[in-house]
Amino acid sequence: MKNALIGLATAFAIALPAFAPPALAQAPGAEPPREWIDKDTGHRVVRLSDEPGSSSLYFNFNGYTPQGDKLVISTPKGLAAINLADRKLTPLVEEAGKFLFVGRKTRSAYFIVTEGETRVVKAVDIDSRKVREVARFDRGDIQTINADETLLAGVVVADPKIETRPDGVLKRDNRYDQAAYAANGPDGKPLPFAEAKEVRLNERLDSKIPMEMFVIDLRTGQKRVVHAATDWLNHLQFSPTDPNLLMFCHEGPWHKVDRLWLLRTDQAGAKPVKIHTRTMNMEIAGHEWFSADGKTVWYDLQTPRGEDFWVAGYDIATGKRSQFHVERNAWSVHFNSSPDGKLFAGDGGDSEMAAHAPDGKWLYLMHPRGIPDVAGIHAPDAEHLIRPGVIDAERLVNMSGHDYRLEPNVNFTPDGKWLVFRSNMHGGQQVYAVELAKH
C-alpha cells in the first residue's frame, strides 16, 4: 500500500521529511533469516518483522506497552504488535498515515492521518484493535505525547502563507531527493553529500522562518502555543515521567546552533532552559534523549566535531554533568540507555559520518566506567565539576551489510535483555533484535 503508515521521521522531520533510502537489491524469492548467531560477536539476532518495508520507531520514541510485553512497529500495510515473549506478530490497523508512538499510561498506539486540510490523530487499542480519534488540528505535525497521555505536542510554521505540505513541511525543502542537498564549496567544486547537507540546513536556519511549538489538551481539545521563535524548532520530546516537562532542539548545523533546551508547559510565560553551552569552536551536542526515569538528559557530545566523542549527561534536578568518553569506532549515529540506567547502546556508523570511523559498522553494548579520584584525594571544587568516565564498548552485531542511509535506531526492550533495531542488511528494511547475553 503506497500510502501505508510509515515509521517516525528523523530529527529533521518538521522542516524536512525523513530521508527514505531506496531498498537494497534483494534476490527474487530470498527470505532473510529469522534467527542466527553473529559469527563475529557470538550474540543471537532475530528478525521480528515479517515483510520488507517494516520499521521500528526513531531511537528516542516509545514503541512499547506500559507493561513491556509488546512492541508496536509499522509495516507496509499499517501497524502491527509483536509479543516479545514469543515474537508473534499481530496486525493492528491498516490505514494510511504515520506511526507516532505508544502511550506510557495506556495500551494505545498513536498515528496521524490527513483528511483534506485537516490533520487527525488517532489511537488504536493494542489488545482490542479498536481505533478512536483523539485530536484534530489544521496545520503542523505532532511529535510527542506526555507521560500521562493528556497532552500532545508539535510544531508548525507560524505563517500560513508560507507554502507547506499538510504536515507542515516546507515544500521547497525535499529531503526525499538527495539532489536537493547538492551544493558547491568555496572553490566552486561540488561538495560531498554530508557537507552539502550542512549548506542546505544552514540556508533553512538562516531563513528565520517563524515557528511555534504547541500542545493539544486531549481532555478538552484545546490547542495552545507554548513557545514561538524564528529558530528552527524540532525534535520535541516529553519527559517519560514528568507530564509537563518538554525537551526540544534548535535544528540546523550542530556547530552553529545551541541545540538542547527544556521547557515547562504548565507555567505561563516559561522561558526555555539551555542544557548545554559550547566551550570551543566546532563543538557539537545533539541526538538527545531522556533517561527512563526522566532524571537525566543524555546526548552525543563532540569536542570538537569529528575528533573527540562523549556520551554526556545533564541531571535535570541539580544541573550536574557527566561525560563518558567513546572511542572513534564506537561512536554511533544514535546512543540510548537501558531501562535501569546502567548501560548504553549505540548503532554505529559508516566512514562518511561524523566520526569517519574506519571500522564503525557495528551495534554496540556500552558499559560506562567512572574515573575515580586518585587515592581518594578530591579537588576542592570536585562536586561542581563534570563527572568523567569512559565507555567500554562491546560489539553485538556486524553491520557491514547495512546501508547507513537508513539509521538503525537502537533501543532497549523493557526487560533490558535485547536491543531492537531496523536494518536493510538483507535487502529490504526489517526490524530485528539482538540478545545482550552471549550464547
Image (cartoon, grey):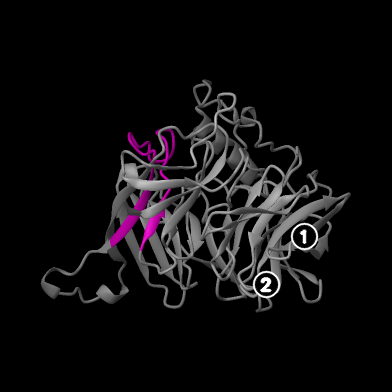
Q: Residue at x 69, y 78 (%)?
A: 268
Q: Give percent across and percent down for residue 35.
A: 45, 43
**Which quarter of the figure is the N terminus placed in?**
top right
Please give the name of the residue rendered at 77% of the width and 60% of the height, measured from the top-left corner.
Answer: 121
**Amino acid type, callout 1:** Val
Q: Is residue 283 visible?
A: yes
Q: Residue at x 47, y 35 (%)?
A: 402
253 up-or-down from 62: above or below: above
Give the residues in magenta: 343-368
Residue 434 image position (x, y, % from top left): 42, 50
Q: Is residue 387 above or below residue 422?
A: below
**Figure quadrant of residue 305:** top left
Disc 1 marks which residue? 121
Q: Where, by quadrant of the figure, is residue 351 drawn?
A: top left
Report the Cα–Cα distance between label 2 and label 1.
Answer: 13 Å
Specify the farthest residue to the left. Answer: 375
Question: Residue shown at 76%/72% (left/top)?
Answer: 218
For this view, does 197 lie left or right of residue 114? left
Label pair 2/1, CB-CB below 8 angstroms = no
Residue 213 versus residue 18: which sits nearer the camera?
18
**Residue 419 magenta:** no
Residue 344, magenta (yes or no): yes
**Element under disc 1:** strand
